[in-house]
Image (cartoon, rainbow, N blue to C red):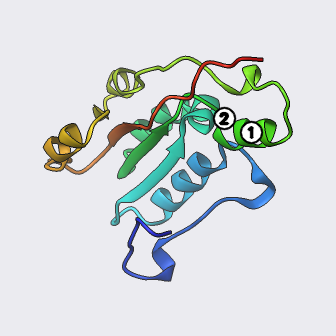
Amino acid sequence: MPYLSVPGPGHFKLTSDFASIGLGFGTALGLAKARPDETTVLVIGDGGFLMTMGELETVVREDLPIVIVLMNDCAYGAELHFLKMRGLPVAKSVFPDVDYAPIAEGFGFQAATIRTRTCRRRRLSWPSRTGQCFSTASSTPTSPPRS
């Protein structure tokens, strides 16, 4: 992973087995529960998050030290690109731009939405406390489907 660094191989888990959308949140919960003295960072796409966002309640109920970085491109990204490569309709792989930070705040997370580099620089000071933090990092939204 070119943009993420960790202390060692025991600190990085990539859940891509079976190409299952949403598998990352459950994995992060297990890691956080197994290592309560370390902060778990979950990087998840908006599609996978949509399927598992109810786990925000689990994080809070179990008081797990998790930072969630949600990559929001308004699509099931991999599916969108595979459909485009095959010349198939993409309408079912895209969805509206949603600000997920207020949803996370409703569960008790410290949350922020980051849409620009300037905003990202301002947000670098948080998290200011241990516990649950949530950040939505929006990439360029996918164009509306044409087919």
Please give the residue where the numbered disc 1 appears in the rendered image.
Answer: 79
Q: Determine the image quadrant of residue 53.
A: top right
The type of residue carrying mark 1 is: Glu
Q: Are marks 2 and 1 in contact (CB under 8 Å)?
A: yes
| Crowdedness near tag 2: few (<14), some (14–19) or many (≥20) residues, C-alpha within 10 Å | many
- The residue lying toward the viewer, choosing from 101 and 53, is 101
Whether residue 26 is situated above or below residue 76 in the rendered picture: below
Work out which quarter of the rendered image holds the C terminus and state it: top right
Q: Position of residue 67 (x, y in %)?
A: 36, 49
* Residue 62 visible in the displayed image: no
- The residue lying toward the viewer, choosing from 103 and 65, is 103
| Crowdedness near tag 1: few (<14), some (14–19) or many (≥20) residues, C-alpha within 10 Å | some
Whether residue 10 is situated above or below residue 56 in the rendered picture: below
Rendered residue at 47%/34% (across/down): 56
Rendered residue at 49%/29% (across/down): 141
The type of residue carrying mark 2 is: Tyr
Q: Position of residue 132 (x, y in %)?
A: 32, 43
Q: Position of residue 84 (x, y in %)?
A: 77, 36
Left or right for 79, reference 69: right
As helix, strand or loop, the secondary structure at mark 2 comes to loop
Rendered residue at 75%/48% (across/down): 20
Please give the residue where the numbered disc 2 appears in the rendered image.
Answer: 76
Rendered residue at 62%/38% (across/down): 48
Q: Determine the image quadrant of residue 100.
A: top left
- The residue lying toward the viewer, choosing from 47 and 74, is 74
* Residue 85 visible in the displayed image: yes
| Residue at the extreme bottom | 8
Left or right for 79, reference 55: right
As helix, strand or loop, the secondary structure at mark 1 comes to helix
Q: Position of residue 16 (x, y in %)?
A: 69, 59
- The residue lying toward the viewer, choosing from 30 and 94, is 94
